[in-house]
Amino acid sequence: MTNILNMEILGNSLQRIGIFLVIILFAFVFSSYLSKIFSSFIFRLLRKYTPEHYGEKFYALVLQPLQYLVLVMIIRTAIESLTYPPSWKIEFWNMPLQVVLDELLWSIVLLSLTWLLLRLIDYIAFILHERAAVTDSKSDDQLVPFIKDALKIFIVVNALFVLLGVVLDLDLTSLLAGLGIGGLAIAFAAQESIKDIFGSITVFLDKPFVVGDVVKIGEAEGTIEKVGLRSTTIRTGNLTVITVPNKKMLDSNVENHTIRSHRRVRQVIGLSYDTNAMQLKEITGDLIDFLKNNPRLNRDVVVVFDEFGENSLNLLVIYYIPFTAYEEHMQEKEKVNYRIMEIVRSHGSSLAFPVREIKIDPDLFKRL
């Protein structure tokens, strides 16, 4: 039996090959179970800062990258137990096959670890977002996505340096110096991204708006949903999403509708040409009294006989409604419109509608 186990295949005894196969089988069978154990341990470490019912969200984010990390680590351990036969001494890019495989496995380990850290950041950002949602301040809602994106960029950049400098054992100083013109080109290409980052910093320092505000930036108008590291997401009135680069905050006028105290209403009321001057004056006076005496409206109102329209005598009506939710604003405007109709009808007048008067020359038929 011992002689059989000591038999060699490709420079490795059957015993060593058997151990290798057992480890590989163990990796594929138990990696899922081990990842659950490790994820439960990590969740317990975070238990002080997170409620128990967030566990489902945590496991949904962490289990898959952790399983890949465990699987690759076990496979790497199994491969290290083997001896490479002389016939496998092949070189790639002037490196032995064993070194290439080792660097490849370490690269996969690093990628899996980076993936896991990114998922942990997603989970921490989820917790912070839930806590920010119950506070009165909107600044924390805006700060969470910014910190999340910044941390992700930091981790990815550091993982790249570790991959190049530690795993692949490259001289980073020589590599960066060797970029030369290419590095300059990259710098020029990245200047737009740098402008976006400075724009996001400007948003956080000056606070022209926060998440939830209704704003107009250039041609984009809607509700701020997210302020990221490079761009701001706006939900329009049509429920579409506009992504505005943050650099626009540096050179565009930002109009914040939320922080205003009132919404202006400007409308033209067209009265029929049957309305005489006395009726017109009485209607105008009653509208002014109604709008000025309405406790829900601002006192600065304008009601004037503005012009002779094509089909109507036009009254210009301007008033201001205290800023509220859009639905409440429209309900208040509707009440005013109903009252305008009642005042117009109470004075024997009516709202105008388009009319065409056609006159036929009787002599026309005689000429025909």
Image (cartoon, rainbow, N blue to C red):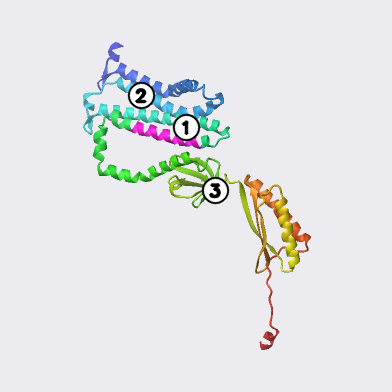
Viewer-nearest residue: 182 or 259:
259
Q: Which mark is residue 75?
A: 2
Viewer-nearest residue: 309 or 291:
291
Decide if residue 225 is on the left or right side of residue 31. Answer: right
Viewer-nearest residue: 13 or 163:
163
Range covered by the magenta-colored residues: 142-160
Q: Amino acid at mark 2?
A: Ile
Q: Quadrant of residue 305?
A: bottom right
Q: Amino acid at mark 1?
A: Asp
Residue at image coords 43%, 43%: 199
Q: Which residue is mark 3?
A: 236
Q: Quadrant of residue 70?
A: top left
Foreground mark, 2 or 3, reads: 3
The residue lying furthest to the bottom in this view is 367
Measured as percent of width and height from the top left, residue 358 is found at: 68, 76
Q: Which quarter of the image is occupied by the N terminus? A: top left
